[in-house]
Amino acid sequence: MEFARPNAVALIEDDADFRQALVERLTLEGYDVRAFSSAEPALKAIDADFPGVVVTDLRMPGLDGRQLLSRLQALDPALPVIMITGHGDIADAVAAMKDGAYDFVAKPFPFERLHDSLNRALEKRGLVLENRRLLAMASDGGQELPLAGSSRAITALRATIAQIADARMDVLIEGETGTGKEAVARALHNGGRRRLAPFVAVNCGALPDGLIESELFGHELGAFAGALRRRVGHVERAHNGSLFLDEVESMPLAVQVKMLRVLEEREVHPIGANEPRALDLRILASSKIDLGEAARTGVFREDLYYRLNVVRLRVPPLRERREDIPLLFAHFLRRAADRHGIEPPPFGDGVRRRLIEADWPGNIRELAHFAERVALSLEETIRPIDAGLSLPDRLNRFEAELLRDALQSHRGDITAVLAEMQVPRKTLYDKLQRHGLKPAAFR
């Protein structure tokens, strides 16, 4: 699973020689450069989905850099704009950064300074565009979660579901916990002729002891003490539709005997009834363990296993369909944001690394919970701190980290660090000395 990084650079520079020199160097570094001599033609070529970064001179005839910045922000506030300025214009460049510019470089500058800023800006732009793409896909509807995606595993599963959705056969659905076995069952039901009839889902592991048979098969009035009225069981409720037996491995052996009769005879015998009742239903069962192995060890009835195992579907875990994770996450993020009445927040490097690197043992369910926390800004908002440190020590450590990050991002350029930190030069040098940070080490 990879996030594509954009590579375009829109360069606006009125000095023809300087512009050409920059174009040649940027092209050699692999950037897709689009050069303009003024702001007006650049504005016509840049839209809200521009796959890159804008680099513009601050001082130009016609629209200057700050005016261009204002126009571009109205077009797309998340479009990174890097200012090129002379030493005499640094105050204006700092003001432009306060207005929303991503960075500035002062002439004359080493190319590596611009190169580093471009790389960071393009990385940020890539995340923004990826977020937008995924959220747009999440809004388009399409496949039901968790069957959305384009991985080979989930595409093959969807194809099989479509092929057997209308077939008159029972299906065994296997998969780890949280992979979406019920979603597969619902897709089978909704894709066939039974879609207008009931879909009855029963969690076999959650049925109350002592009432399992009554819950599943129903009972007649007076069938036992406390049976004050007739009860239609889950099996009979699924007549003409589909019965989904979730965690079928949890069904007690005694109940498995009766369920086997339902599968073989397509009839149910409620407790206290004189005659069985004929049924027309499809049975879909799911298990999070190897039901064949359970049958071989005697934990599950072998005859019931073979009766269920007419067609077997395996739902892949997330680790086997990693390319689907961003889209699934975007679905869950939008759903969580809608539920809380907020806009889906953009997700940054920390979330991106988690999506790429995590094994997701809880699969779809774990990913949905993670998206919920991101929607509420509970991820990437807490910075780990040593619990044993005093408040002054914690603040001191935090300050050192901020300074180190600024020096690294600006490659030791003190002018740029001053602009970002917005502190007097002497104060900055005093803090650098206190924390043992040397700007030359970051160049």
Image (cartoon, helix red, strand yellow):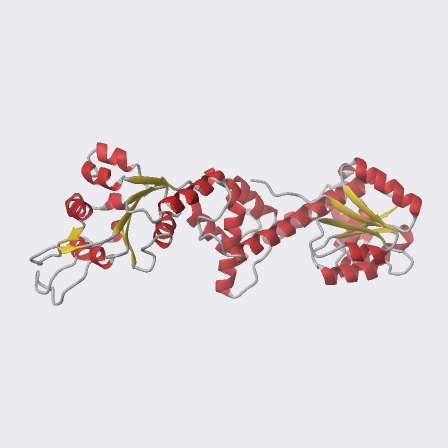
| Residue 108 visible from this viewpoint | no
Horizontal relation, residue 77 to residue 35: left or right: left
> Percent x, y for residue 38?
87, 55
Residue 141 higher or lower than 52, as above or below: below
**Tag count:** 0
Q: Quadrant of the N terminus?
A: top right
> Percent x, y for residue 443?
78, 38
Query: What residue sits 73% from the left and 56% below the top?
Result: 47
Pick the residue in front: 356 or 282: 282
Q: Residue 264 sits in which quadrant?
A: top left
| Residue 176 visible from this viewpoint | yes
Query: What residue sits 92% from the left and 58% below the top?
Result: 61
Query: What residue sits 42% from the left and 40% below the top?
Result: 316
> Percent x, y for residue 154?
45, 42
Horizontal relation, residue 271 to residue 305: left or right: left
> Percent x, y for residue 144?
44, 53
Pick the residue in front: 380 or 181: 181
Pick the residue in front: 300 or 161: 161
Horizontal relation, residue 365 to residue 408: left or right: left
Pick the residue in front: 137 or 109: 137
